[in-house]
Image (cartoon, rainbow, N blue to C red):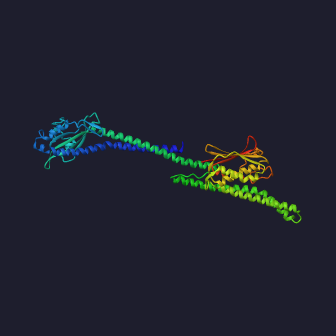
Amino acid sequence: MRFSLRIFFGYFLLVSLLAAYVLSLVRDEIKPAVRQSSEEVLVDTANLLAELIQPDFVAGRLDAGRFAKAIKLFAERNPQAKVWGVPRDKTFLRVYVTDAQGKVIMDSSGQALGQDYSQWRDVYLTLRGQYGARSSLADPKNELSTVMHVAAPITKGTEIVGVLTVARPNWAMQPFIDRSENKLWRAGLLLLAIGLVIGALFSWWLSRGINKLTGFALAVSEGQTVPVPAFTANRELTTLATALGTMRERLEGKAYIENYVHDLTHELKSPLAGIRGAAEILFEEGQSLKESDHSRFTSHIRQETARMQQIVDRLLQLATLEARHGLKDAAPVDVAKLLNEVIGALSPQAGTRQILHAPWPAAIIHGEAFLLTQAIRNLLQNALDFTPEHGQIHIGLTLEAQNLHIAIHNQGEPIPDYALSRLFERFYSLPRPATGQKSTGLGLALTRTMLELHGGSVSLANHAEGGVVARVCLPMN
């Protein structure tokens, strides 16, 4: 399973469990909270009504008093109310009054007149000066038929002479509880969905960074020149990427030095042997040598010295480029103008060879003009070296998709099959047809490195119509 999916499923499980726990906790608290709030209102209502009934109760005219009439009319009222979307067409409040012995002497519902309520908690506790309240089932077979009763004392001076109880069925509050629970579940599911989307984005963002690091490590292992990836607002991945980049540079530096010392030692053996041989002859037989031989040996020393200097200079340039992982001072480059300048610079060396091309299309790329000029010049110089007298070199510039293509086709001899795969190796070179001499074997390696720094590529192949074609591909973005 992919790392990003593991993160997402782990996050999904954690968020789901947390959401389920919170929703369950809040749901379990809704009903008690609503009932507690209702009980608080009933406490105030019971005490208010106890004060209002006190004069009629003490005077003994409870049944004929204004309070009894008001309670009767209250029970018959139709509120015609709509409370938070829930319609109300009747009142739910029941009021009953007991005397000091707990006998019901007034009941707004008429169902308990004359009954003994002295043992009910609301009456029993209130008559003893305590807070009296209870919840009882109106229907023993229905667990949802509970009714909340809250009592308040009716006093005469400091003496408790009766109890007034207000009762309200809990099912009257159920629509509000159900509505709150539905809203809670909808809000919870919405928050869960938002949390999962955020989790998915976070997993994608984190796995994207890890994939970039993985791609960077694979590219380095394949020897590609790629920049160290950068990460926005992720210090840990940035630190890891920097550490990988530093490790790459140190490992590359070590391997680079080892390879170069080996290659340079091997390549310098031949000119050093020639210089040493010529110098020994000049030292041992200098006085007896003919002037022509003396000139030949000194000329050989100069040529081999110049070749060694060229090798060292090219190696230093290649080492500098290979140590870079990106462009410096990049700017827009007019490729048509660049090609014209390279052709103009090498025209004196062309002699009887012709450099032909069609009108260049307009093409601008972003890069280092100096490096691009050197790369194209190396390829054109190579084409001139392998083109016979009176031969032709065709240069084409085309635009395809988001890439720019340059083709340099010469009419020289085809490349031997054994050499095709080695042309871009350091110090590998084929003899020039005109002189039979080899170059330093670093020009094509330099060219490839220069173009790869621009995100491009270069290849050499035998052309189907004869000759050799060098192809360059550069991204235009």
Question: Residue 347 location in percent, x, y?
Answer: 74, 52
Left or right: 351 in relation to 104: right
In the rendering, at what x and y percent does residue 246 appear?
60, 56
Number of marks in the rendered image: 0
Question: In the figure, 293 relative to 426: above or below?
Answer: below
Give how far across and how far down residue 270 sits, in percent. 79, 56
Q: Residue at x 66, y 54 (%)?
A: 371
* Along the line of sight, the residue nearer the viewer: 191 or 278: 278
**Residue furthest bottom as drawn:** 287
Q: Relative to 175, say whether 345 is above or below.
A: below
Which residue, as the protein is rendered here, is positioned at the far front?
359
Kindly identify the residue that appears in the image at 36 percent across and 41 percent down.
183
Closest to the observer: 401 or 7?
401
Residue 223 seen by the camera: no
User: What residue is rendered at 19% in x and 37% in y?
Assistant: 75
| Residue 394 left/right relative to 104 | right
Quadrant including the N terminus: top right
Along the line of sight, the residue nearer the viewer: 260 or 53:
260
